[in-house]
Structure formats: structure tokens, C-alpha cells
């Protein structure tokens, strides 16, 4: 596939790019600056783009088979920029005639019980709430976009750099945790799960939790 990857310069974005390239896909990696460090592959092209501008998204997406996103707010940005990005990506993809989207979401909106989401638990860190709420609002933008084949892939409660094992579990709308209640995934295995979904399309129109 020819994949447009938004947020390619971030830690998760770089790992998704490398996973795509290792599987033989062509990747156009978008960042604000147009530079993506740490990726040296003839099938990778780094370009500049504004993910809050639907015209930029449409121009960049044209000719691609799918759009992948590892977008997130920088430390000095209002978390609400996630919603602006979601709206711009949806509109831009429509303009470009591209309908497959896989988006790196947040775990906050995943359920830990039938009527309780992770963000609503006492253990959820207060400082994470603004980004988590913005991520949930972004999900709602996709939820309303029935004309796009989107999948919102969320990591476990804790995601860190680590080992690529190729092993993971998924759950639709639910936080993935182990027998001890720990919810964790490495960035490398999250990239595996993300690209598996991009290739298979098994969970279209789904908020998909990942973890071990």
C-alpha cells in the first residue's frame, strides 16, 4: 500500500513507519517540519504538512491507499488541537477520495467495566485528563464519519519503548489488561497491532483496545 502517515516524527509514529516499511509498504511521513529522523529507507519520503488544515491533508492524501495517524498535541499545545486535527483529517480525506483511516487514539475512553471508562476511575491521573478528554472528542468526530472506513486503535493504559515481540491482544471498546489488572504494551508491539489492523481492516468503525 501507499500510506500517508501523519505524526511520523514522534516516537510512536517512527515505529509505525518502520513497521510499515519492513512489510513492504510505501510511506509518506508527515511532520510539521518536514523532517523525520531515524528512518533511512528508499520507500520512505518525509514531507511537511499541517494536520489542522484540511486542504493540506487533501493534497497530501491524494494518490494514497490509506491514511495512518500517530498525531498528538505537543507539550505546549492545547490538547483540543486533537479535535481540530480529527476534523481536518476527515474533511481532507473526503476531498481526496481516500476512505481508509487508522488513528492512534487514547486509552481513556476504553471501558474497564460495563458503565465505567478508564478516565472515570479513581486511579486515572488527573494531569492526563485534558488530553484524554480531547482524544475522546476526536473519537466522536470519527464515530460520526460513517462514509470513512476508520479504526481508532488505542494503546494500553501504559505504553513505553520496549521490545517487538509480535504478541498482543485486542478488545473492542475495552481496556486490555493482564490477570493482575496491569495494562501495558510496548510502542513496538503497538505498531505491530496498528499495522495489522491497517492491512486487515478487521475492525472498521471500532474503538480497538490493545495490550498484552
Image (tube, grey):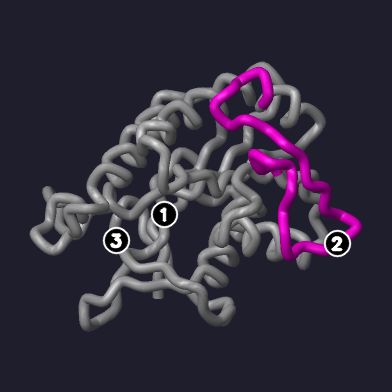
Which circle, 2 or 1, is nearer the viewer?
Answer: 2
Residue 48 vs residue 175, the one in the foreground: 48
Main SS class of the magenta portion in the image: loop
- Residue at the outermost right position: 42
* Mark 1 Cα-neighbour bin, 10 Å: few <14, some 14–19, many ≥20: many
Part of the protein shown in magenta: 30-56
Above or below residue 206? Residue 43 is below
- Identify the residue under disc 3: 175
**For the residues bearing labels 2 and 1, Cβ distance under 8 angstroms:** no
Above or below residue 17? Residue 55 is above
Q: Residue at x 74, y 49 (%)?
A: 35
Disc 1 and disc 3: Cα gap in Å?
A: 9 Å
Estimate the x, y position of residue 177 in percent, counting from the top left: 29, 72
- Identify the residue under disc 2: 41
| Number of numbered discs on residues | 3
- Identify the residue under disc 1: 154
Amino acid at each position: 500500500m501507499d500510506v500517508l502517515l501523519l505524526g511520523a516524527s514522534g516516537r510512536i509514529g517512527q515505529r509505525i513507519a518502520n513497521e510499515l516499511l519492513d512489510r513492504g509498504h510505501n510511506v509518506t511521513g508527515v511532520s510539521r517540519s518536514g523532517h523525520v529522523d531515524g528512518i533511512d529507507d528508499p520507500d520512505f519520503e518525509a514531507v511537511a504538512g499541517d494536520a489542522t488544515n484540511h486542504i493540506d491533508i487533501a493534497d497530501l492524501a491524494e494518490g494514497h491507499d490509506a491514511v495512518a495517524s500517530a498525531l498528538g498535541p505537543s507539550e505546549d499545545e492545547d490538547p483540543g488541537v486533537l479535535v481540530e486535527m480529527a476534523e481536518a483529517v476527515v474533511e481532507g480525506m473526503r476531498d481526496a477520495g481516500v476512505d481508509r483511516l487508522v488513528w492512534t487514539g487514547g486509552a481513556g475512553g476504553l471501558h474497564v467495566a460495563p458503565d465505567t471508562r478508564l478516565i472515570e476511575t479513581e486511579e486515572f491521573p488527573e494531569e492526563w485528563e485534558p488530553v484524554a478528554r480531547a482524544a475522546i472528542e476526536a473519537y466522536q468526530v470519527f464515530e460520526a464519519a460513517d462514509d470513512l472506513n476508520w479504526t481508532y486503535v488505542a494503546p494500553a493504559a501504559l505504553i513505553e519503548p520496549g521490545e517487538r515481540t509480535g504478541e498482543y491482544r485486542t478488545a473492542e471498546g475495552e481496556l486490555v489488561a493482564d490477570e493482575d489488572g496491569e495494562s501495558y504494551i510496548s510502542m513496538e508491539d503497538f505498531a505491530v497491532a496498528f499495522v495489522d489492523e491497517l492491512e486487515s481492516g478487521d475492525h472498521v468503525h471500532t474503538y480497538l483496545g490493545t495490550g498484552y
